[in-house]
Amino acid sequence: MGRAKRVVLAYSGGVDTSVCIPYLKQEWGVEEVITLAADLGQGDELEPIRQKALDSGATESLVVDAREQFVLEYAFPAIQGNALYENRYPLSTALARPLIAKLLVDAAKDYGADAVAHGCTGKGNDQVRFDVAIAALNPELNVLAPAREWGMSREQTIAYGERFGIAAPVKKSSPYSIDRNILGRSIEAGPLEDPWTEPPEEIYLMTRSIANTPDLPDYVDIGYEKGIPVTLNGQSLAPILLIEQLNAIVGTHGIGRIDMVENRLVGIKSREIYEVPALSVLIQAHRDLESLTLTADVTHYKRGIEETYSQLVYNGLWYSPLKAALDAFIQKTQERVDGLVRIKLLKGTGTIVGRQSHTSLYDTDLATYGAEDTFDHKAAEGFIYVWGMPTRVWSEKSRQMGG
Ligand code: ARG
């Protein structure tokens, strides 16, 4: 008896996921492997990947263009939540996992599969994200993770694949592990494993090195409606196009590189490099627009929500009840986050230089130091008397106590 009869496998075209196909069949007695490759804007050619799955023994090879869904349902909510894990990483990889899990679960239903599978190892965050998301969407479905159990080295994995007609990578394989989608690239391993080693310039593809960026700035105006970016330099753009165009221009100025040591859920510290040009600027600008359109208390309260939200997304709890509750809070706050933010892009830095909104709470007559000032200065005195009361009482007590 095999572990499952019919399995839908998340497929990337790489060695590990390709080897999963014969492995599931030979070692775990799976009868049919259906592969699913999701196009999330990683820029790979999909037809060769579709064919490779069939050549590796898949019964059926599905390719799903999920780019728009990815941007609309996963990236945009994260922008509204100003989601940055450990205050820095905008979750470009983490956001893709719950969507891939959903595609797997849907395909399993359509094709009558009794299990789904992925090629994650046992050390990363992604296995957690897949397994938990799949369990949330269909608790009955089995999840198979061959690479978590097979214990093969890279060489052994390649050799195993060759026995089943899976060609070893033609190029001398890169020492890096790279994950990529429309939002950005995550790069780890190889020389980057030493946190003291400066990232070699060769790892970057979406962002220029400062030495090669223009000497003159570009300005971009990003328009938001209810916290969602909808225009670029005055032009309404479809979600995918907006991200792509912004990636190009922001990357040209070398903006959006992050080099960090982060805390994985499984307790390991890892050094990861990210390049997330559009996403980093979209969060920066969104946050600025919120400072113009939200009240002080909502802005401050939301910071705490954002931190929890980012941790939930990082830790694989996208489909959890707490995440749904935080979503409701965040959506409510976005009702008036409309307006325009202007960013100056130059030499690796995006600087916000202007913002405007028809929902702006900024009142020039209150803020000005000029003659138009409408603020009642006398009212400040009574306010400060009451505001400072607890501190004054404390201080008087200290004196009486001889402190
Ligand atoms: N550390 C990031 C995360 O957990 C990215 C993981 C994938 N990175 C990679 N280089 N393959 O979301």
Image (cartoon, rainbow, N blue to C red):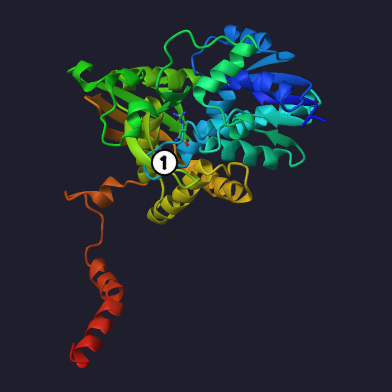
Which residue appears at 23% of the width and 18% of the height?
213
User: Does residue 140 appear left or right of residue 332 in this picture?
Assistant: right
Query: Of 85 and 355, which appears nearest the observer?
Result: 85
**Does residue 250 show up?**
yes
Number of numbered discs on residues? 1
**Label 1 Cα crowd, 10 Å radius (few <14 / some 14-19 / many 20+):** many
**Does residue 14 show up?**
no
User: Does residue 276 appear left or right of residue 255 in this picture?
Assistant: right
Q: Quadrant of residue 395?
A: bottom left
Query: Of 99 and 82, which appears nearest the observer?
Result: 99
Query: Of 341 and 212, which appears nearest the observer?
Result: 212
Secondary structure under the numbered disc 1 in the rendered image: loop
Which residue appears at 67% of the width and 24% of the height?
9
Percent of width and height locating residue 350: 27, 30
Which residue appears at 63% of the width and 9% of the height?
165
Q: Quadrant of residue 58?
A: top right
User: Does residue 309 appear left or right of residue 205 in this picture?
Assistant: right
Tell whether circle 1 marks a residue whose Cβ is less than 8 angstroms from ligand 1.
Answer: no
Percent of width and height locating residue 269: 40, 43
Which residue appears at 71% of the width and 26% of the height?
27
Percent of width and height locating residue 364: 27, 46
Q: Quadrant of the N terminus?
A: top right
User: Does residue 169 appear left or right of residue 389 in this picture?
Assistant: right
With respect to residue 248, does 188 lie above or below?
Answer: below
Q: Residue under label 1, please give it.
A: 84
With respect to residue 388, does 203 lie above or below?
Answer: above
Q: Quadrant of the C terminus?
A: bottom left
| Badge 1 amino acid | Leu
Percent of width and height locating residue 211: 19, 19
With respect to residue 20, does 281 lie above or below?
Answer: below
